[in-house]
Image (cartoon, rainbow, N blue to C red):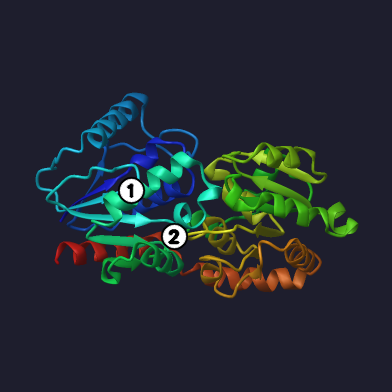
């Protein structure tokens, strides 16, 4: 079967979706067997995963984006000869005809919490819902929570939607003490720390995390820093000022992908009090690295944690503070949760994601 994956996110500044496409495409190709896995827009060589810039050369990037823009703008039907299945990203609003159409839904936040996104992002995503999701022959949801939200909001045929969990890079399962030491030296992390990992944006609840950290006991704050690893996305000015002025808080900004396993494994705890996640890569990655997790009791996060994390109401500063205090004060609890997390994270392997995706593609193409 000839399959084309819309890999547009690899050309853009992106976080979770780019991470998904990169690892998924790599493992689809490894496990394809007699299937052919191509990309759209058309490029062959892909560089190292970098969330801040395109992963192909400048000429290939602008050529590909120009082609995409032209096709989206025209809305005229077009085809890729011999193609059996096309998997669209949310950037592609005019996919090729004749081939079966599939896509992945990462979350439904633009429908459920539009106030946490820019107006332009909401408009583009909802247009994707009307032009792609409603006509797709098959849809991959990254969690059961996301699947329920998708079916409830768009009232789609459940037979068209399959839950397939993303994976965790193998590097998170095999972090060494040397890896941790190298990264801590590189980023000047000399003290123990609690970690938040992700783009700084309203949905991630950074003001709530800062408030909870500020209310920890003086002895705990004296021992542990709060480290934020991720770029300033569309955080409001007030959030940025709070980060800069908060005592004991360090913002590392964008951290290269190769450093994330070491930074994650070096943390005493991962704090991830997000208001909504379709999957929650930082939670799964921290569990794979044996790091105990405090996260929200909303959306997909309890499903992904699978009983291997402390769950809190992200609206409650007190609950978040108490959970952090409890974990940071108890090495035995951290060890127990870290071990449970490692076991749970085994459910999230990219080779399994790729195998199940190929099975789903064959199912959709055979209808």
State the SS at label 1.
helix
**In the image: residue 193, left or right of residue 16:** right
Expressed as whole percent of the image width and height from the top left, the position of residue 294 reads: 66, 64
The local secondary structure at tag 2 comes to loop
> Left or right: 47 with respect to 73?
right
Q: CA distance from mark 1 to mark 2?
A: 24 Å
Residue at image coords 21%, 58%: 33
The answer to whether any part of residue 345 appears in the image is yes
Q: Which residue is mark 2?
A: 167
Q: Which residue is mark 1?
A: 128
Q: Is residue 128 above or below residue 309?
A: above
Identify which residue, 299 or 2, lies in the foreground.
299
Count of numbered marks: 2
Q: Residues within 10 Å of mark 1 (few under 14, many from 20)?
A: some
Q: Position of residue 165 (x, y in %)?
A: 41, 64
Image x and y of residue 160, in percent? 26, 66
Is residue 192 something that shows in the picture? no
């Amino acid at each position: 079967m000839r399959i084309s994956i819309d890999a547009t996110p690899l050309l853009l500044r992106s976080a979770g979706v780019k991470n998904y496409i990169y690892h998924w495409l790599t493992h689809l190709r490894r496990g394809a067997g007699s299937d052919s896995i191509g990309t759209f827009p058309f490029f062959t060589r892909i560089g190292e995963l970098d969330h801040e810039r395109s992963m192909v050369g400048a000429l290939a990037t602008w050529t590909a984006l120009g082609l995409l823009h032209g096709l989206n703008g025209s809305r005229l039907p077009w085809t890729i000869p011999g193609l059996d299945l096309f998997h669209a990203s949310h950037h592609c609003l005019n996919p090729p005809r004749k081939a079966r159409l599939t896509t992945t839904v990462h979350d439904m936040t633009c429908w459920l919490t539009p106030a946490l996104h820019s107006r332009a992002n909401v408009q583009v995503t909802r247009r994707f819902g009307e032009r792609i999701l409603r006509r797709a022959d098959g849809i991959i949801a990254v969690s059961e929570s996301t699947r329920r939200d998708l079916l409830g909001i768009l009232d789609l045929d459940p037979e068209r939607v399959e839950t397939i969990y993303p994976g965790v890079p193998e590097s998170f399962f095999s972090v060494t003490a040397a890896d941790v030491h190298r990264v801590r030296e590189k980023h000047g992390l000399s003290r123990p720390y609690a970690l938040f990992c992700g783009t700084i944006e309203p949905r991630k609840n950074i003001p709530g995390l800062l408030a909870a950290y500020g209310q920890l006991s003086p002895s705990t704050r004296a021992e542990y820093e709060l480290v934020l690893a991720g770029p300033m996305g569309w955080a409001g000015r007030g959030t940025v000022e709070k980060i800069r002025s908060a005592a004991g808080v360090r913002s590392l900004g964008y951290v290269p992908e190769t450093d994330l396993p070491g930074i994650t494994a070096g943390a005493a705890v991962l704090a991830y009090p997000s208001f909504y996640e379709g999957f929650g890569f930082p939670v799964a990655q921290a569990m794979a690295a044996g790091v105990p997790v405090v996260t929200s009791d909303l959306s997909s996060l309890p499903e992904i944690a699978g009983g291997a994390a402390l769950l809190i109401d992200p609206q409650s500063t007190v609950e978040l503070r108490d959970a952090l205090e409890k974990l940071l004060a108890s090495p035995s609890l951290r060890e127990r949760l870290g071990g449970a997390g490692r076991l749970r994270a085994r459910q999230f392997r990219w080779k399994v994601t790729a195998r199940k995706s190929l099975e789903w593609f064959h199912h959709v193409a055979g209808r």
